[in-house]
Amino acid sequence: MANYDLYAMFLKQVDRAEPYLGANAELLPLFREPKEVTEYTLPLRLADGSLRLFKAWRSHHNNALGPYKGGVRFYRDASREEIAALSAWMTVKCATAGLPFGGSKGGVRVHPQDLDGEELERLSRAYALATASTTGPDLEIPAPDINTNPQTMAWFQDTYEKVRGDSVPAAYTGKPLEVGGSQGRNASGAHGGAFVLRELLRELGMDPRDVRVAIQGYGSLGITAHQAFAAQGMKVVAVSDSHGGVYAPGGLDPKSLGEHKLLTGLLRHFPGAEDLTGEEIFALDVDVVVPAALECALTEHNADSVKAKVVLELANAPTTPEADRILEDKGVLVAPDVLANSGGVTVSCFEWIQGRTGDFWSETEVLRRLDERLSGALRETWTLSEQFRIPLRTAAFVRGVGKVLRAMRLKGIWP
Ligand SMILES: NC(=O)C1=CN([C@@H]2O[C@H](COP(=O)(O)OP(=O)(O)OC[C@H]3O[C@@H](n4cnc5c(N)ncnc54)[C@H](OP(=O)(O)O)[C@@H]3O)[C@@H](O)[C@H]2O)C=CC1
Ligand SMILES: O=C(O)CCC(=O)C(=O)O
Protein backbone atom coordinates (compact mmCIF):
# COMPACT_ATOMS: atom_id res chain seq x y z
CA MET A 1 0.00 0.00 0.00
CA ALA A 2 3.00 2.25 0.62
CA ASN A 3 3.17 3.48 -2.99
CA TYR A 4 -0.29 5.02 -3.12
CA ASP A 5 -0.90 8.68 -2.36
CA LEU A 6 -3.93 8.54 -0.09
CA TYR A 7 -4.64 12.26 -0.21
CA ALA A 8 -4.65 12.15 -4.01
CA MET A 9 -7.11 9.24 -3.79
CA PHE A 10 -9.43 11.33 -1.62
CA LEU A 11 -9.24 14.26 -4.05
CA LYS A 12 -10.13 12.01 -7.00
CA GLN A 13 -13.22 10.87 -5.13
CA VAL A 14 -14.20 14.50 -4.51
CA ASP A 15 -13.64 15.28 -8.21
CA ARG A 16 -16.15 12.61 -9.21
CA ALA A 17 -18.80 14.17 -6.92
CA GLU A 18 -18.14 17.77 -8.03
CA PRO A 19 -20.51 17.86 -11.06
CA TYR A 20 -23.45 17.02 -8.75
CA LEU A 21 -22.73 19.60 -6.03
CA GLY A 22 -24.34 22.61 -7.70
CA ALA A 23 -23.32 26.18 -6.88
CA ASN A 24 -21.72 25.16 -3.56
CA ALA A 25 -18.96 23.44 -5.54
CA GLU A 26 -17.44 26.92 -5.50
CA LEU A 27 -16.41 26.18 -1.87
CA LEU A 28 -14.55 22.98 -2.79
CA PRO A 29 -11.05 24.52 -2.83
CA LEU A 30 -11.35 25.12 0.93
CA PHE A 31 -12.95 21.71 1.51
CA ARG A 32 -10.13 19.96 -0.34
CA GLU A 33 -7.50 21.19 2.16
CA PRO A 34 -7.15 20.06 5.79
CA LYS A 35 -7.63 23.03 8.09
CA GLU A 36 -4.48 22.17 10.04
CA VAL A 37 -2.10 19.27 10.46
CA THR A 38 0.10 19.31 13.55
CA GLU A 39 3.27 17.27 13.94
CA TYR A 40 4.57 16.23 17.36
CA THR A 41 7.78 14.61 18.58
CA LEU A 42 7.05 12.36 21.54
CA PRO A 43 10.00 11.41 23.78
CA LEU A 44 9.93 8.05 25.57
CA ARG A 45 12.38 6.57 28.05
CA LEU A 46 12.40 2.82 27.34
CA ALA A 47 12.63 0.13 30.01
CA ASP A 48 16.33 -0.43 29.14
CA GLY A 49 17.04 3.23 29.97
CA SER A 50 17.51 4.43 26.37
CA LEU A 51 15.65 7.45 24.98
CA ARG A 52 13.53 7.16 21.82
CA LEU A 53 11.63 9.78 19.86
CA PHE A 54 8.35 9.02 18.07
CA LYS A 55 6.75 11.15 15.37
CA ALA A 56 3.03 11.76 15.72
CA TRP A 57 0.39 13.77 13.82
CA ARG A 58 -3.10 15.09 14.39
CA SER A 59 -5.02 16.35 11.37
CA HIS A 60 -8.11 18.56 11.60
CA HIS A 61 -9.76 18.44 8.21
CA ASN A 62 -13.04 20.34 8.47
CA ASN A 63 -15.31 21.32 11.38
CA ALA A 64 -18.22 23.01 9.60
CA LEU A 65 -20.65 20.39 10.99
CA GLY A 66 -19.29 20.26 14.54
CA PRO A 67 -16.26 19.30 16.67
CA TYR A 68 -13.56 17.22 15.01
CA LYS A 69 -13.98 13.45 15.34
CA GLY A 70 -11.66 10.62 14.41
CA GLY A 71 -9.56 7.72 15.60
CA VAL A 72 -5.90 7.58 16.60
CA ARG A 73 -3.73 4.81 15.14
CA PHE A 74 -0.41 3.47 16.36
CA TYR A 75 1.16 2.24 13.18
CA ARG A 76 4.70 1.71 11.95
CA ASP A 77 4.07 3.36 8.55
CA ALA A 78 1.96 6.28 9.87
CA SER A 79 2.74 9.49 7.99
CA ARG A 80 1.48 13.05 7.74
CA GLU A 81 -0.16 12.36 4.36
CA GLU A 82 -1.93 9.23 5.56
CA ILE A 83 -3.32 10.93 8.66
CA ALA A 84 -4.44 13.99 6.67
CA ALA A 85 -6.26 11.81 4.11
CA LEU A 86 -7.94 9.73 6.81
CA SER A 87 -9.12 12.94 8.51
CA ALA A 88 -10.68 14.09 5.24
CA TRP A 89 -12.55 10.78 4.88
CA MET A 90 -13.76 11.24 8.47
CA THR A 91 -15.38 14.54 7.46
CA VAL A 92 -17.31 12.79 4.68
CA LYS A 93 -18.11 9.79 6.89
CA CYS A 94 -19.56 11.85 9.75
CA ALA A 95 -21.66 13.85 7.30
CA THR A 96 -22.85 10.70 5.49
CA ALA A 97 -23.98 9.17 8.79
CA GLY A 98 -25.70 12.44 9.76
CA LEU A 99 -23.49 13.09 12.81
CA PRO A 100 -22.85 16.57 14.25
CA PHE A 101 -19.08 16.23 13.75
CA GLY A 102 -16.27 17.29 11.48
CA GLY A 103 -13.34 15.06 10.54
CA SER A 104 -9.97 14.47 12.18
CA LYS A 105 -7.45 11.66 12.62
CA GLY A 106 -4.35 11.06 14.71
CA GLY A 107 -1.41 8.74 14.44
CA VAL A 108 1.86 7.79 16.07
CA ARG A 109 4.60 6.18 13.97
CA VAL A 110 5.34 3.16 16.15
CA HIS A 111 5.22 -0.61 15.87
CA PRO A 112 3.41 -1.28 19.17
CA GLN A 113 4.71 -4.85 19.30
CA ASP A 114 8.20 -3.37 19.83
CA LEU A 115 7.13 -1.86 23.17
CA ASP A 116 6.19 -3.51 26.44
CA GLY A 117 2.90 -2.72 28.19
CA GLU A 118 4.30 0.02 30.40
CA GLU A 119 6.13 1.72 27.52
CA LEU A 120 2.92 1.66 25.48
CA GLU A 121 1.01 3.26 28.35
CA ARG A 122 3.59 6.03 28.68
CA LEU A 123 3.61 6.64 24.90
CA SER A 124 -0.20 6.84 24.95
CA ARG A 125 -0.05 9.35 27.79
CA ALA A 126 2.60 11.36 25.91
CA TYR A 127 0.26 11.58 22.89
CA ALA A 128 -2.70 12.66 25.07
CA LEU A 129 -0.53 15.28 26.76
CA ALA A 130 0.77 16.68 23.47
CA THR A 131 -2.74 16.98 22.01
CA ALA A 132 -4.59 18.01 25.20
CA SER A 133 -4.95 21.67 24.27
CA THR A 134 -6.91 20.81 21.10
CA THR A 135 -8.97 17.99 22.62
CA GLY A 136 -12.36 18.25 24.32
CA PRO A 137 -16.08 17.48 23.87
CA ASP A 138 -16.60 20.66 21.80
CA LEU A 139 -13.20 20.70 20.12
CA GLU A 140 -11.97 17.30 19.07
CA ILE A 141 -13.00 13.86 20.33
CA PRO A 142 -10.46 11.08 19.59
CA ALA A 143 -11.31 7.35 19.49
CA PRO A 144 -9.59 4.01 18.71
CA ASP A 145 -8.30 2.93 15.31
CA ILE A 146 -5.61 0.45 14.21
CA ASN A 147 -3.61 -0.89 17.20
CA THR A 148 -5.41 1.30 19.75
CA ASN A 149 -8.29 0.09 21.91
CA PRO A 150 -10.47 0.90 24.94
CA GLN A 151 -7.44 0.64 27.26
CA THR A 152 -5.61 3.26 25.17
CA MET A 153 -8.66 5.53 25.46
CA ALA A 154 -8.71 5.06 29.26
CA TRP A 155 -5.05 6.20 29.41
CA PHE A 156 -5.81 9.17 27.11
CA GLN A 157 -8.84 10.12 29.22
CA ASP A 158 -6.96 9.90 32.52
CA THR A 159 -4.05 12.02 31.22
CA TYR A 160 -6.45 14.63 29.79
CA GLU A 161 -8.45 14.84 33.03
CA LYS A 162 -5.23 15.28 35.05
CA VAL A 163 -4.24 18.20 32.79
CA ARG A 164 -7.71 19.74 33.06
CA GLY A 165 -8.13 18.99 36.76
CA ASP A 166 -11.71 18.01 35.97
CA SER A 167 -13.83 15.05 34.94
CA VAL A 168 -14.60 15.23 31.21
CA PRO A 169 -16.30 11.97 30.20
CA ALA A 170 -17.13 13.07 26.64
CA ALA A 171 -13.57 14.00 25.60
CA TYR A 172 -12.77 10.53 24.15
CA THR A 173 -14.94 7.70 22.85
CA GLY A 174 -14.36 3.97 22.53
CA LYS A 175 -13.58 3.92 26.28
CA PRO A 176 -14.11 0.86 28.50
CA LEU A 177 -17.63 0.66 29.98
CA GLU A 178 -16.23 1.19 33.48
CA VAL A 179 -14.96 4.68 32.59
CA GLY A 180 -17.94 5.94 30.62
CA GLY A 181 -17.90 3.83 27.45
CA SER A 182 -21.02 2.89 25.54
CA GLN A 183 -22.61 -0.52 25.29
CA GLY A 184 -22.09 -1.87 21.79
CA ARG A 185 -19.09 0.32 20.82
CA ASN A 186 -16.57 -2.54 20.41
CA ALA A 187 -18.52 -4.36 17.70
CA SER A 188 -20.24 -1.25 16.31
CA GLY A 189 -18.16 -1.07 13.09
CA ALA A 190 -19.08 -4.66 12.32
CA HIS A 191 -22.76 -4.27 13.21
CA GLY A 192 -22.98 -1.10 11.14
CA GLY A 193 -21.42 -2.94 8.18
CA ALA A 194 -23.84 -5.85 8.64
CA PHE A 195 -26.84 -3.46 8.64
CA VAL A 196 -25.60 -1.75 5.47
CA LEU A 197 -25.00 -5.13 3.82
CA ARG A 198 -28.45 -6.40 4.81
CA GLU A 199 -30.08 -3.36 3.14
CA LEU A 200 -27.91 -3.73 0.02
CA LEU A 201 -28.81 -7.41 -0.31
CA ARG A 202 -32.46 -6.42 -0.01
CA GLU A 203 -32.02 -3.92 -2.88
CA LEU A 204 -30.31 -6.65 -4.92
CA GLY A 205 -33.02 -9.21 -4.09
CA MET A 206 -30.50 -11.57 -2.42
CA ASP A 207 -31.33 -13.73 0.61
CA PRO A 208 -28.62 -13.43 3.32
CA ARG A 209 -28.87 -17.19 3.91
CA ASP A 210 -27.55 -17.80 0.37
CA VAL A 211 -24.68 -15.34 0.71
CA ARG A 212 -21.04 -16.47 0.98
CA VAL A 213 -18.56 -13.95 2.36
CA ALA A 214 -14.75 -13.60 2.36
CA ILE A 215 -13.13 -11.20 4.86
CA GLN A 216 -9.60 -9.77 4.58
CA GLY A 217 -8.29 -8.78 8.03
CA TYR A 218 -9.03 -10.56 11.30
CA GLY A 219 -8.46 -7.83 13.91
CA SER A 220 -11.08 -5.89 15.91
CA LEU A 221 -13.22 -5.27 12.86
CA GLY A 222 -12.74 -8.54 10.96
CA ILE A 223 -13.47 -10.79 13.95
CA THR A 224 -16.61 -8.93 15.00
CA ALA A 225 -17.76 -8.74 11.36
CA HIS A 226 -17.47 -12.52 11.09
CA GLN A 227 -19.72 -12.83 14.17
CA ALA A 228 -22.23 -10.21 12.94
CA PHE A 229 -22.54 -11.72 9.43
CA ALA A 230 -22.93 -15.25 10.84
CA ALA A 231 -25.66 -13.94 13.18
CA GLN A 232 -27.55 -12.68 10.11
CA GLY A 233 -27.39 -16.17 8.57
CA MET A 234 -24.60 -15.46 6.05
CA LYS A 235 -21.84 -18.01 5.50
CA VAL A 236 -18.32 -16.64 6.04
CA VAL A 237 -16.28 -19.12 3.97
CA ALA A 238 -12.85 -17.43 4.00
CA VAL A 239 -10.86 -15.02 6.15
CA SER A 240 -7.26 -13.83 6.09
CA ASP A 241 -4.77 -11.96 8.25
CA SER A 242 -1.23 -10.70 7.63
CA HIS A 243 0.10 -14.30 7.55
CA GLY A 244 -2.41 -15.79 5.08
CA GLY A 245 -5.88 -17.21 5.41
CA VAL A 246 -8.27 -20.14 5.50
CA TYR A 247 -11.13 -21.33 3.31
CA ALA A 248 -13.98 -23.74 4.14
CA PRO A 249 -16.81 -23.89 1.58
CA GLY A 250 -19.27 -25.04 4.28
CA GLY A 251 -18.56 -21.91 6.41
CA LEU A 252 -16.16 -21.06 9.25
CA ASP A 253 -17.34 -21.00 12.85
CA PRO A 254 -16.39 -17.60 14.39
CA LYS A 255 -15.98 -18.91 17.93
CA SER A 256 -13.62 -21.80 17.22
CA LEU A 257 -11.67 -19.80 14.60
CA GLY A 258 -11.26 -16.92 17.09
CA GLU A 259 -9.94 -19.36 19.70
CA HIS A 260 -7.55 -20.89 17.14
CA LYS A 261 -6.15 -17.44 16.26
CA LEU A 262 -5.81 -16.53 19.93
CA LEU A 263 -4.02 -19.80 20.69
CA THR A 264 -1.69 -20.03 17.68
CA GLY A 265 -1.48 -16.38 16.55
CA LEU A 266 -2.51 -17.56 13.07
CA LEU A 267 -5.61 -18.33 11.03
CA ARG A 268 -3.74 -20.88 8.96
CA HIS A 269 -3.79 -24.57 9.90
CA PHE A 270 -7.36 -24.30 11.22
CA PRO A 271 -8.73 -27.86 11.42
CA GLY A 272 -11.19 -28.65 8.61
CA ALA A 273 -10.20 -25.65 6.44
CA GLU A 274 -7.81 -25.17 3.51
CA ASP A 275 -4.96 -22.68 3.85
CA LEU A 276 -4.95 -19.66 1.49
CA THR A 277 -2.32 -17.11 0.58
CA GLY A 278 -3.24 -13.49 1.35
CA GLU A 279 -3.58 -12.72 -2.38
CA GLU A 280 -6.20 -15.42 -2.97
CA ILE A 281 -8.87 -13.96 -0.69
CA PHE A 282 -10.31 -11.42 -3.17
CA ALA A 283 -10.40 -13.85 -6.11
CA LEU A 284 -12.59 -16.46 -4.41
CA ASP A 285 -15.92 -17.51 -5.85
CA VAL A 286 -18.05 -15.76 -3.18
CA ASP A 287 -20.91 -13.21 -3.19
CA VAL A 288 -19.37 -10.56 -0.94
CA VAL A 289 -15.75 -9.64 -0.25
CA VAL A 290 -14.97 -7.52 2.80
CA PRO A 291 -11.64 -5.69 3.01
CA ALA A 292 -11.19 -5.12 6.77
CA ALA A 293 -7.43 -4.63 7.05
CA LEU A 294 -5.44 -1.77 5.54
CA GLU A 295 -5.70 0.89 2.83
CA CYS A 296 -5.25 0.06 -0.87
CA ALA A 297 -5.99 -3.64 -0.64
CA LEU A 298 -7.85 -3.60 -3.97
CA THR A 299 -5.77 -2.03 -6.71
CA GLU A 300 -5.37 -2.12 -10.50
CA HIS A 301 -3.36 -5.33 -9.95
CA ASN A 302 -6.07 -7.49 -8.36
CA ALA A 303 -9.47 -5.79 -8.89
CA ASP A 304 -10.08 -7.68 -12.11
CA SER A 305 -9.89 -11.00 -10.24
CA VAL A 306 -12.87 -10.16 -8.00
CA LYS A 307 -15.77 -12.55 -8.66
CA ALA A 308 -18.07 -11.27 -5.92
CA LYS A 309 -21.14 -9.12 -6.62
CA VAL A 310 -20.49 -6.79 -3.66
CA VAL A 311 -17.40 -5.28 -2.02
CA LEU A 312 -18.22 -4.08 1.51
CA GLU A 313 -15.46 -1.70 2.65
CA LEU A 314 -14.99 -2.10 6.40
CA ALA A 315 -11.38 -0.87 6.21
CA ASN A 316 -10.70 2.77 5.41
CA ALA A 317 -9.76 3.45 1.79
CA PRO A 318 -9.23 -0.19 0.77
CA THR A 319 -10.02 0.46 -2.92
CA THR A 320 -7.91 2.71 -5.14
CA PRO A 321 -9.66 4.89 -7.76
CA GLU A 322 -8.19 2.66 -10.51
CA ALA A 323 -9.66 -0.42 -8.84
CA ASP A 324 -12.98 1.42 -8.45
CA ARG A 325 -13.17 1.90 -12.25
CA ILE A 326 -12.32 -1.75 -12.90
CA LEU A 327 -14.97 -2.95 -10.44
CA GLU A 328 -17.56 -0.58 -11.94
CA ASP A 329 -16.86 -1.94 -15.43
CA LYS A 330 -17.32 -5.47 -14.10
CA GLY A 331 -20.64 -4.49 -12.47
CA VAL A 332 -19.35 -5.09 -8.91
CA LEU A 333 -21.17 -2.95 -6.36
CA VAL A 334 -18.82 -1.22 -3.90
CA ALA A 335 -20.35 -0.20 -0.55
CA PRO A 336 -17.92 2.62 0.30
CA ASP A 337 -16.03 2.96 3.58
CA VAL A 338 -17.62 6.34 4.37
CA LEU A 339 -20.93 4.49 4.67
CA ALA A 340 -20.08 0.82 5.30
CA ASN A 341 -17.70 1.41 8.21
CA SER A 342 -19.46 4.39 9.76
CA GLY A 343 -20.90 2.19 12.55
CA GLY A 344 -17.83 2.86 14.74
CA VAL A 345 -18.04 6.62 14.67
CA THR A 346 -21.84 6.53 14.92
CA VAL A 347 -21.72 4.64 18.22
CA SER A 348 -18.86 6.97 19.23
CA CYS A 349 -21.37 9.78 18.73
CA PHE A 350 -23.87 7.89 20.91
CA GLU A 351 -21.12 7.53 23.57
CA TRP A 352 -20.43 11.27 23.38
CA ILE A 353 -24.16 12.02 23.87
CA GLN A 354 -24.38 9.56 26.79
CA GLY A 355 -21.23 11.06 28.38
CA ARG A 356 -22.68 14.57 28.12
CA THR A 357 -26.13 13.72 29.46
CA GLY A 358 -25.27 10.98 31.96
CA ASP A 359 -28.15 8.92 30.49
CA PHE A 360 -26.70 5.53 29.47
CA TRP A 361 -28.47 3.21 27.01
CA SER A 362 -28.75 -0.58 26.76
CA GLU A 363 -26.94 -2.47 23.96
CA THR A 364 -30.32 -3.20 22.36
CA GLU A 365 -31.09 0.52 22.28
CA VAL A 366 -27.64 1.37 20.85
CA LEU A 367 -28.01 -1.21 18.07
CA ARG A 368 -31.59 -0.14 17.31
CA ARG A 369 -30.47 3.47 16.84
CA LEU A 370 -27.44 2.38 14.81
CA ASP A 371 -29.58 0.25 12.51
CA GLU A 372 -32.11 3.05 12.01
CA ARG A 373 -29.42 5.61 11.17
CA LEU A 374 -27.28 3.48 8.83
CA SER A 375 -30.20 1.81 7.05
CA GLY A 376 -31.58 5.30 6.39
CA ALA A 377 -28.19 6.56 5.14
CA LEU A 378 -27.85 3.55 2.82
CA ARG A 379 -31.34 4.03 1.36
CA GLU A 380 -30.80 7.75 0.71
CA THR A 381 -27.41 7.04 -0.88
CA TRP A 382 -28.89 4.25 -2.99
CA THR A 383 -31.66 6.56 -4.24
CA LEU A 384 -29.14 9.24 -5.22
CA SER A 385 -26.99 6.65 -6.95
CA GLU A 386 -29.98 5.46 -9.01
CA GLN A 387 -31.16 9.01 -9.75
CA PHE A 388 -27.82 10.18 -11.17
CA ARG A 389 -26.59 6.73 -12.30
CA ILE A 390 -23.44 7.11 -10.26
CA PRO A 391 -21.55 4.60 -8.07
CA LEU A 392 -22.48 4.41 -4.38
CA ARG A 393 -19.17 6.03 -3.39
CA THR A 394 -19.84 9.06 -5.56
CA ALA A 395 -23.42 9.23 -4.26
CA ALA A 396 -22.16 9.09 -0.66
CA PHE A 397 -19.76 11.94 -1.45
CA VAL A 398 -22.52 13.98 -3.09
CA ARG A 399 -24.65 13.59 0.08
CA GLY A 400 -21.82 13.99 2.60
CA VAL A 401 -19.74 16.70 0.95
CA GLY A 402 -22.97 18.49 -0.03
CA LYS A 403 -23.99 18.74 3.65
CA VAL A 404 -20.57 20.09 4.65
CA LEU A 405 -20.56 22.68 1.86
CA ARG A 406 -24.06 23.86 2.82
CA ALA A 407 -22.90 24.28 6.44
CA MET A 408 -19.82 26.19 5.25
CA ARG A 409 -22.03 28.45 3.13
CA LEU A 410 -24.49 29.12 6.00
CA LYS A 411 -21.75 29.79 8.52
CA GLY A 412 -19.97 32.01 6.04
CA ILE A 413 -16.68 30.28 6.61
CA TRP A 414 -14.97 32.49 4.02
CA PRO A 415 -13.57 35.45 5.98
N1 LIG B 1 -11.53 0.05 14.97
C1 LIG B 1 -12.44 0.91 14.53
O1 LIG B 1 -13.28 1.47 15.27
C2 LIG B 1 -12.50 1.23 13.07
C3 LIG B 1 -11.55 0.74 12.18
N2 LIG B 1 -11.66 1.05 10.85
C4 LIG B 1 -10.70 0.57 9.88
O2 LIG B 1 -10.79 -0.85 9.79
C5 LIG B 1 -9.51 -1.38 9.42
C6 LIG B 1 -9.10 -2.44 10.43
O3 LIG B 1 -9.11 -1.85 11.73
P1 LIG B 1 -9.01 -2.75 13.06
O4 LIG B 1 -9.74 -4.03 12.87
O5 LIG B 1 -9.35 -1.85 14.17
O6 LIG B 1 -7.44 -3.03 13.07
P2 LIG B 1 -6.65 -4.21 13.81
O7 LIG B 1 -5.26 -3.72 13.98
O8 LIG B 1 -7.40 -4.71 15.00
O9 LIG B 1 -6.65 -5.42 12.72
C7 LIG B 1 -6.07 -5.33 11.47
C8 LIG B 1 -6.12 -6.71 10.83
O10 LIG B 1 -5.63 -6.61 9.49
C9 LIG B 1 -4.71 -7.68 9.29
N3 LIG B 1 -3.78 -7.36 8.21
C10 LIG B 1 -2.77 -6.48 8.19
N4 LIG B 1 -2.15 -6.52 7.00
C11 LIG B 1 -2.80 -7.44 6.26
C12 LIG B 1 -2.66 -7.96 4.95
N5 LIG B 1 -1.70 -7.50 4.15
N6 LIG B 1 -3.52 -8.90 4.51
C13 LIG B 1 -4.49 -9.37 5.32
N7 LIG B 1 -4.69 -8.92 6.57
C14 LIG B 1 -3.85 -7.98 7.02
C15 LIG B 1 -4.03 -7.88 10.62
O11 LIG B 1 -3.41 -9.15 10.63
P3 LIG B 1 -2.75 -9.80 11.94
O12 LIG B 1 -3.91 -10.27 12.78
O13 LIG B 1 -1.94 -10.93 11.41
O14 LIG B 1 -1.95 -8.71 12.59
C16 LIG B 1 -5.25 -7.77 11.52
O15 LIG B 1 -5.94 -9.00 11.56
C17 LIG B 1 -8.59 -0.16 9.33
O16 LIG B 1 -8.61 0.30 8.00
C18 LIG B 1 -9.26 0.86 10.23
O17 LIG B 1 -8.89 2.18 9.88
C19 LIG B 1 -12.70 1.77 10.37
C20 LIG B 1 -13.67 2.24 11.20
C21 LIG B 1 -13.63 2.08 12.62
O1 LIG C 1 -15.11 6.37 16.48
C1 LIG C 1 -14.52 7.35 16.04
O2 LIG C 1 -14.69 8.46 16.44
C2 LIG C 1 -13.49 7.22 14.94
C3 LIG C 1 -13.62 6.02 14.04
C4 LIG C 1 -12.58 6.06 12.97
O3 LIG C 1 -11.45 6.43 13.18
C5 LIG C 1 -12.95 5.67 11.64
O4 LIG C 1 -14.14 5.52 11.36
O5 LIG C 1 -12.05 5.54 10.80
Image (cartoon, helix red, strand yellow):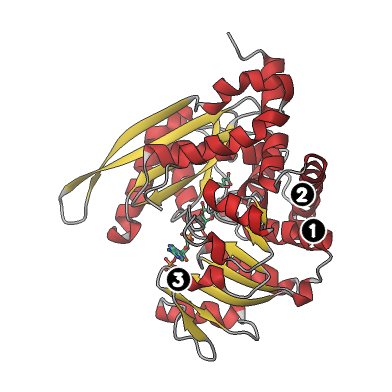
Instruction: Classify 10 Å Cα crowding around label 2: few (below 14), some (14-19), many (20 and above).
Output: many
- Which residue lies under the disc numbered 3? 278
**CB contact under 8 Å: marks 2 and 1:** yes
User: What kind of residue is marked 3?
Assistant: Gly
Q: What is the CA distance from the residue labelled 1 to the residue labelled 3?
A: 29 Å
- The foreground one among 116 and 11 is 11
Instruction: Give SS at disc 1.
Output: helix
| Residue 201 higher or lower than 146, as above or below | below
Q: Which quadrant, please, contains the C terminus? A: top right
What whole-number distance in Å separates the C-alpha atoms at marks 3 and 2?
30 Å
Residue under the point 72% across and 41% down: 395
Image check: 116 left or right of 50?
A: right
Considering every residue shown, the one lying at the far top of the view is 415
Foreground: disc 1 or disc 3: 3
Which badge, 3 or 2, comes first in the chain's sequence?
A: 3
Amino acid marked by disc 2 = Leu
Within 8 Å: ligand 1 and the Cβ of disc 3?
A: yes
Which residue is at 66% across, 12% downward?
Answer: 412
Classify 99 as above or below 114.
Answer: above
Question: Badge 1: few (under 14), some or many (20 or more) residues near its Cα, within 10 Å?
Answer: some
* Residue ID for mark 1: 199
Q: Nearer the viewer, residue 405 or 188?
A: 405
Q: Is residue 293 left or right of residue 64?
A: left
Task: Residue 125: give x, y in percent of width and height.
Answer: 37, 44
Q: Is residue 5 visible?
A: yes
Rendered image quadrant of residue 292: bottom right
Q: Amino acid at mark 1?
A: Glu
Q: Which residue is mark 2?
A: 378
Q: CA distance from mark 2 to mark 1?
A: 7 Å
